[in-house]
Image (tube, rainbow, N blue to C red):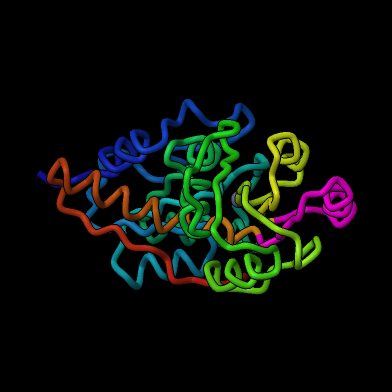
Amino acid sequence: MSVTVGDIAGLCGRIAPYTDAEEWDNVGLLAGRDDAPVDTVLCALDLTEAVVDEAVARGAQMIVTHHPILFRGRKNLREDDAEGRMLCRLVRANLAMVAMHTNYDNAKPGVNDALAAALGLHDVADIDRALRQGRTDIPTFGTFADFAEQALGGPIRRYGDPNAPVRRVSVLGGAGGDYLSMALECGTDVFVTGEVSYHRAMDAVDNGMCVLEAGHAATERPGILALALALQKAADAVQYKIRVLNSEVRLCL
Ligand SMILES: [Zn+2]
């Protein structure tokens, strides 16, 4: 009997229960049908036309993303805008799609555990459902920032004194500006996030915390790779004969 979209959506829900998503979010099976057969799944950060093309080219019948689609309540499926075009392409290619957004942010392990691991942190603890704090053996902010650029594969905006000693590192992938005060309260030396405003970052520096703004995608991509590995492992464990691929599309850092 072949593996179905519903089977894979079920495995995804075991990795990060959909009921753990924030109330405003849009997660789970967002396109396709439960009973469609699947032998290849593509994991990606975002559903874009390039990712739909990649899924078709690599023989996938299903895409699992971090960021949802249909987030703002579309009222049409016209093809003269990018999202409408992408959605039509998705349907015509007979692809199913699952989103694992804040349910995966809040999972254990989730997107921020993968980010902490990518940054080589140890003794990682949960500060909040999503925020993680660990320790680094790299002694100063400047050298830690250099290392983080290598680890995450791109340039990082640095706020803080390069010679400041660092030990406790808090991480939150994506848009983490709202977590600055929580990171400060838990004695963070360096806060690593995807996006933060200049003034909020400078406030944090005034309060003795360094900040690395590493890019939304760069801080969440380790989570996508971890998700692909976890899904493959979960499928192997129940003897679903599927391949799980990690997207190679890179439209931004
Ligand atoms: Zn994100």
Q: Is residue 210 magenta?
A: yes
Residue 204 pos. (x, y %): 83, 48
Name the residue: 53% across, 40% down: 105
Q: Which residues are magenta?
A: 195-215
Q: Nearer the viewer, residue 251 or 29?
A: 251
Residue 201 pos. (x, y %): 83, 53
Q: Nearer the viewer, residue 86 or 170?
A: 170
Is residue 2 shown above or below 152? Answer: above
168 displayed left or right of 206: left
Is residue 115 shown above or below 4? Answer: below
Name the residue: 43% across, 54% down: 91
Name the residue: 59% across, 30% down: 22
Residue placed furthest toward the left:
1
Q: Nearer the viewer, residue 221 or 239?
A: 221
77 displayed left or right of 51: right
* Quadrant placement of the N terminus: top left
Residue 67 pos. (x, y %): 55, 49
Total labels: the figure holds 0
* Quadrant placement of the C terminus: bottom right
Name the residue: 50% across, 47% down: 111
Answer yes or no: is residue 110 visible. Answer: yes
